[in-house]
C-alpha cells in the first residue's frame, strides 16, 4: 500500500489532484483510515490512474472519463484512441509550424518595408525563351500560401505519375505560375508544369501548353520553403517599380533545387517586365 504522497510520486500527479479525483468519485483510494482520514492506494491502481490521465489527455471531460472507465475500456481500445489523438496533435503541430512560418514571413516583409528593401544586387534581367510544358491545373481560394500549397503539391504528385505513365521525358526544371480565375470570387488558377520536348502532345489527362517568350524578365533567387517567399516577392516588386519597369504577364516560379527538406529548396522567381511608358 502507498500513502497518497507516495502514490502521487509514482503516478506523476499532484496530491491535490488525487484528492479531487477522490472527491468526485473518479479514483477512490483503496482504503481510508477512519481515525486519521489518511488515504492509501494499491499498486494496481496505477493502471487505473494511467487510463484516467490518458483519457483526459485525449480531451475528454472528467465526467466523460468517468463514464468511459465505468465501461472498462480495454488496453487495446485505449491504445487505438491514443494513437488517433497523437496523429491529431501531430497534425495540429504541423499546422501551427506552417502558420508560424507565414507569420515570420509577413513580419520580415513588414521589416523590409520599413527599410525600403530593394534587392538591387540580387536581381538580374534576362530573356525567357518560349517553352512547351505539360501541366495540370487546380483552383485555390487566393494567393496566400495556405491556399496555394494544399493545391499545388497534389498537382505535382499527380503530374509526375501521369508523365511516367505516358512515357513523356522531362526537358527542364519544374515551374509554377498562377492567374486570376474568371470567377468573381478572388480564386486563383494554379498551374503545376514541367518542360517537355517540342514534339510532346497531350493525353493521359495532361495539357500541353506553349508558354510565350519574354524579352525581359526580372529574376531573383529564393532559398527555402515557398511559404516564406513573401519578402522576396515584395522585394522584387519594389525593384521593378524603383527601376522604372512594370510587371508584364504572369510570373514563373522555377524550381532549381528540390529535396525532401523544404529548407534546401532553391527557386528562381521570374517576372516578365517592360519599361514604364514604353
Image (spheres, rainbow, N blue to C red):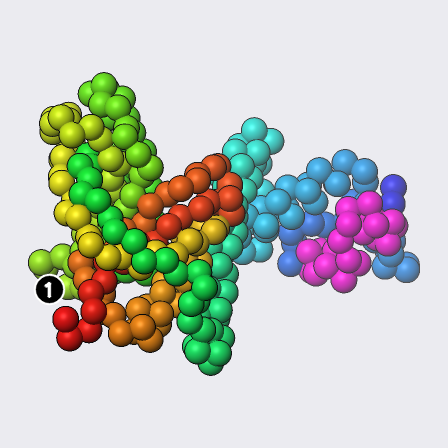
The quarter of the image holding the N terminus is: top right
Q: Residues within 10 Å of mark 1 (few under 14, many from 20)?
A: few
Q: Quadrant of residue 230?
A: bottom left
Of residues 44 and 153, the one drawn nearer to the viewer in this rendering: 153
Q: What stretch is highlighted in magenta?
A: 3-23
Of residues 86 and 190, the one drawn nearer to the viewer in this rendering: 190
What is the residue that sits farthest to the right in this orientation? 36
Q: Percent position (x, y) of residue 271?
A: 27, 58
What is the residue that sits farthest to the bottom in this orientation? 114
Q: In which quarter of the image is residue 254?
A: top left
Residue 267 visible in the current orientation: yes
Name the residue at 65% across, 54% down: 25
**Would residue 98 appear left or right of 11 to someone viewing this image?**
left
Q: Percent position (x, y) of residue 183?
A: 10, 59
Of residues 112 and 20, the one drawn nearer to the viewer in this rendering: 112
Name the residue at 48% across, 50% down: 224
* Residue beneath disc 1: 184
Amino acid at each position: 500500500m502507498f500513502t497518497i504522497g507516495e502514490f502521487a510520486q509514482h503516478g506523476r500527479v499532484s496530491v491535490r489532484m488525487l484528492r479531487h479525483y477522490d472527491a468526485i468519485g473518479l479514483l477512490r483510494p483503496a482504503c481510508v483510515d477512519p481515525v486519521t482520514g489518511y488515504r492509501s492506494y494499491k499498486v494496481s491502481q496505477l493502471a487505473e490512474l494511467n487510463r484516467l490521465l490518458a483519457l483526459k489527455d485525449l480531451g475528454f471531460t472528467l465526467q466523460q472519463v468517468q463514464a468511459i472507465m465505468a465501461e472498462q475500456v480495454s488496453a487495446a481500445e485505449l491504445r487505438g484512441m491514443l494513437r488517433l489523438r497523437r496523429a491529431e496533435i501531430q497534425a495540429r503541430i504541423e499546422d501551427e509550424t506552417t502558420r508560424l512560418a507565414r507569420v515570420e514571413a509577413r513580419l520580415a516583409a513588414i521589416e523590409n518595408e520599413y527599410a525600403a528593401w530593394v534587392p538591387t544586387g540580387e536581381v538580374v534581367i534576362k530573356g525567357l525563351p518560349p517553352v512547351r510544358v505539360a501541366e495540370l491545373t487546380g483552383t485555390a481560394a487566393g494567393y496566400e500560401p495556405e491556399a496555394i500549397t494544399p493545391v499545388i503539391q497534389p498537382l505535382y504528385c499527380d503530374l509526375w505519375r501521369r508523365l511516367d505513365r505516358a512515357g513523356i521525358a522531362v526537358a527542364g526544371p519544374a515551374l509554377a505560375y498562377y492567374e486570376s480565375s474568371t470567377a468573381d470570387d478572388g480564386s486563383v488558377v494554379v498551374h503545376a508544369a514541367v518542360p517537355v520536348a517540342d514534339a510532346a502532345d497531350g493525353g493521359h489527362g495532361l495539357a500541353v501548353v506553349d508558354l510565350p517568350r519574354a524579352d525581359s524578365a526580372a529574376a531573383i533567387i529564393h532559398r527555402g520553403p515557398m511559404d516564406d517567399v513573401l519578402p522576396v516577392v515584395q522585394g522584387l516588386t519594389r525593384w521593378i517599380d524603383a527601376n522604372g519597369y512594370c510587371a508584364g504577364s504572369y510570373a514563373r516560379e522555377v524550381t532549381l533545387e528540390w529535396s525532401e527538406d523544404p529548407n534546401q529548396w532553391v527557386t528562381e522567381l521570374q517576372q516578365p517586365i517592360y519599361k514604364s511608358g514604353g
